[in-house]
Image (cartoon, rainbow, N blue to C red):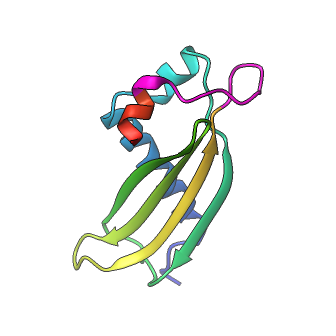
Amino acid sequence: MGIVYYANYFIWFEVGRTDWLREHGWCYREMEAEGYTLPVIDAQCFYKESARYDDEIDVRTLAALLSPVRIQFQYDVVRASDGAVLATGTTVHATLGRDGRPRRVPERVRTLLS
């Protein structure tokens, strides 16, 4: 059909989130070494236009602290050639420790999200 499979948008959200964290000094490898995980507890995607194979896309990502133990990421998937917003979405993540129990977001990360 030439149209990108709908679930790929969630993969693009993950790429956007990973890049956002890295750009702000908190990569997944470091996070896990410090004993944190960020499992997704809610995910939504709202499709506006179809992405087609070979479209170059940008994933614009913003993050906000929802509570001491929850982070929300917001995404816009944009076609680079014309700036069309193809989809928007959010993911909400709990901050957990190695034991799987809620853990406060580290102070240095909270300041990024404030």
- Residue 31 percent coordinates (x, y): 52, 23
Residue 62 inside the magenta-drawn segment? no
Camera sees residue 55: no
Q: Main secondary structure of the magenta part?
A: loop
Q: Is residue 73 above or below residue 99?
A: below
Q: Residue furthest left?
A: 81
Point 40% across, 24% down: residue: 108
Q: Is residue 52 above or below residue 76?
A: below
Residue 100 inside the magenta-drawn segment? yes
Residue sitting nearer the eye, 5 or 26: 26
- Residue 36 percent coordinates (x, y): 60, 24
Point 54% across, 76% down: residue: 46
Point 38% across, 33% down: residue: 111
Point 54% across, 30% down: residue: 105
Where residue 11 sits, quadrant-wise, is bottom right
Residue sitting nearer the eye, 65 or 47: 65
Left or right: residue 71 versus residue 102 is left
Q: Range of the magenta residues?
A: 96-108
- Residue 103 percent coordinates (x, y): 66, 26
For the image, the number of numbered tags is: 0
Point out the image quarter for the C terminus.
top left
Residue sitting nearer the eye, 110 or 43: 110
Left or right: residue 67 versus residue 108 is right
- Residue 88 percent coordinates (x, y): 47, 71
Camera sees residue 35: yes
